[in-house]
Image (cartoon, grey):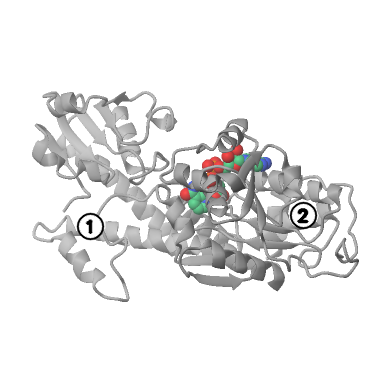
């Protein structure tokens, strides 16, 4: 395991500050030795007001906590302070309105000092080898740690909600905090790893009513304080699973990797069944889903998985296995089947239309309800068809060239009526099951291919 840790440390360490390790923490007001983070959390700071962080900040304020959001993006800070959503996400605007009197934002990480806990939800981009970079987390956590140190604040709770490479918290991020704060984790301050399992397009409800709250904790006081917070923050009563930090890091990506395995199993079955003219994949999946050991979720014949989490988390699990000298054949296979599913879509469309034909790609986001096109089947199809000499028209209900730069260079369908009656469109392919596309085949004058529909 040592080589894993040294690899993580070598790649992501920031230069240590000049601070020295301090003795055990004490309570500034009484002089008594205090347990870290033993107090109830009433005021929180949220570092990173992006797709997830803005929703965390807004929902916490709406649920009664005092919240200060911190970001390096001036525009996001301004919008939150104006009571506006910094990005498009259903229910975010209403939630910000609900908690407006308790929510504000700043560019200054020193404002975290007056809060009981800081949630970090900065980007953690994938590296080519599948690992996640610690760069943004290090910068954000270091700034907060320095502010705490300068103010003489002790017993702060640092909560990491960004996805990390398993082992990174113990090997890189906590040692950095100990250096900066001049203290010992679990004694002078607490750290929790607390990822969220949300789906873009339904983040607000996903945060407030999750199936599971996952807490990795450096010490029982930190975990207990966070558990207590969730007991009033959640609208439902989810399972609160507390464990070591590295267990939670592994659990986060394993959950998503398991779902990708289920999706790829479904797609593999769909490709096999397609070779049997009398096989009906929907009937097969309906039958399988009734078995309670399997369940119906994700047993729906469709297209490849995409988005910012599933593909990356699954590859991260494979990377994590390699780091300890193992293979992760199931994770690798999910990835391979996903690529095969994408190629199969392109080949199927190429059998239905020829280069030079006009093909409309409808739905280029990775799922309905979001503008994100990352690793989406529709965007992949549009790019491949364009590369092979087709004239490609693109339509989506949320993605635009402004919020999804991958769409630049494509002809957009802006007038739906004109499109429906355009005789030059040889084929329309529904790549994302936005409900508005339902029943399209009956109203179009052109051929519609909708892999999502029965
Ligand atoms: N988006 C999802 O569906 C989703 C789901 C689960 C987990 N995650 C994880 O959550 C994390 C954040 O994802 P996201 O989609 O919200 O990212 P995002 O890119 O939408 O937002 C990140 C925000 O962090 C800000 N930021 C960067 N450096 C900062 C710093 N030093 N201090 C303060 N703010 C800083 C950015 O300006 C941005 O506003 C990632 O680790 C991601 O893997 C995302």
The residue that mark 1 highlights is 270
Q: Position of residue 75 (x, y in %)?
A: 58, 31
Residue at (21% x, 48% y) in the render: 451
Residue 24 relative to residue 239: left or right: right
Disc assigned to residue 177: 2
Residue 362 relative to residue 124: left or right: left
Disc assigned to residue 321: none
Task: Pick whichever, 4 or 282, lies toward us.
Answer: 282
CB-based contact (under 8 Å), mark 1 and mark 2: no
- Asked which quadrant contains residue 88, the reply is top left
Q: Position of residue 416 (x, y in %)?
A: 21, 28
User: Which quarter of the figure is the N terminus placed in?
Assistant: bottom right
Asked whether residue 71 is in view, the answer is yes
Of the two numbered discs 1 and 2 on the same chain, state the one appearing first in sequence: 2
Q: Position of residue 213 (x, y in %)?
A: 52, 65
In the rendered view, would you say 403 is above or below 1? above
The kind of secondary structure element at disc 1 is helix
Quadrant position of ligand 1: top right
In the rendered view, would you say 272 is above or below 290? above
Q: CA distance from mark 1 to mark 2?
A: 49 Å
Q: Residues within 10 Å of mark 2 (few under 14, many from 20)?
A: many
- Asked which quadrant contains residue 135, the reply is top right
Residue 32 relative to residue 166: left or right: right
User: Which quarter of the figure is the C terminus placed in?
Assistant: bottom left
Asked whether residue 326 is in view, the answer is no
Task: Pick whichever, 107 or 30, lies toward us.
Answer: 30
């Amino acid at each position: 395991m040592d080589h894993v840790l040294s690899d993580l440390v070598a790649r992501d360490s920031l230069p240590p500050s000049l601070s020295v390790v301090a003795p055990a923490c004490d309570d500034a007001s009484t002089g008594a030795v205090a347990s870290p983070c033993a107090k109830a959390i009433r005021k929180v700071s949220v570092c990173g007001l992006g797709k997830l962080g803005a929703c965390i900040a807004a929902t916490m304020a709406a649920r009664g906590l005092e919240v200060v959001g911190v970001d390096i993006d001036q525009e996001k800070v301004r919008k939150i302070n104006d009571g506006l959503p910094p990005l498009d996400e259903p229910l975010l605007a209403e939630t910000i309105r609900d908690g407006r009197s308790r929510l504000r934002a700043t560019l200054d990480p020193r404002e975290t000092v007056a809060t009981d806990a800081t949630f970090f939800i900065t980007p953690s981009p994938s590296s080519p080898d599948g690992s996640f970079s610690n760069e943004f987390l290090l910068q954000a956590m270091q700034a907060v740690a320095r502010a705490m140190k300068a103010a003489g604040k002790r017993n702060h709770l640092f909560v990491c909600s960004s996805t990390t490479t398993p082992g990174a918290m113990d090997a890189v991020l906590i040692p950095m905090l100990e250096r900066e704060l001049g203290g010992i984790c679990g004694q002078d301050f607490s750290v929790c790893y607390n990822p969220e399992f949300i789906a873009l397009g339904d983040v607000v409800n996903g945060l407030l009513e999750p199936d599971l709250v996952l807490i990795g904790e450096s010490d029982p006081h930190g975990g207990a304080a966070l558990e207590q917070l969730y007991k009033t923050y959640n609208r439902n009563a989810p399972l609160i699973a507390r464990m070591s930090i590295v267990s939670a890091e592994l659990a986060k990506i394993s959950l998503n990797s398991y779902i990708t395995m289920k999706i790829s199993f479904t797609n593999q079955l769909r490709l096999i069944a397609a070779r049997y003219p009398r096989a009906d994949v929907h009937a097969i999946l309906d039958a399988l889903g009734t078995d309670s050991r399997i369940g119906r979720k994700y047993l729906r014949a469709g297209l490849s998985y995409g988005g910012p989490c599933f593909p990356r988390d699954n590859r991260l699990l494979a990377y994590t296995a390699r780091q300890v000298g193992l293979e992760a054949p199931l994770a690798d296979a999910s990835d391979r089947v996903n690529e095969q599913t994408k190629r199969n879509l392109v080949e199927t469309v190429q059998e239905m239309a020829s280069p030079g034909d006009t093909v409309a790609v409808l739905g280029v986001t990775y799922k309905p309800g979001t503008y994100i096109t990352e690793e989406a089947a529709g965007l992949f199809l549009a790019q491949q068809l364009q590369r092979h000499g087709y004239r490609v028209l693109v339509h989506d209900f949320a993605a635009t060239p402004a919020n999804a730069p991958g769409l630049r260079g494509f002809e957009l369908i802006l007038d739906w009526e004109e499109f429906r009656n355009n005789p030059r469109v040889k084929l329309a392919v529904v790549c994302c099951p936005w409900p508005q596309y339902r029943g399209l085949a009956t109203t179009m004058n052109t051929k519609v291919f909708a892999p999502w529909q029965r």
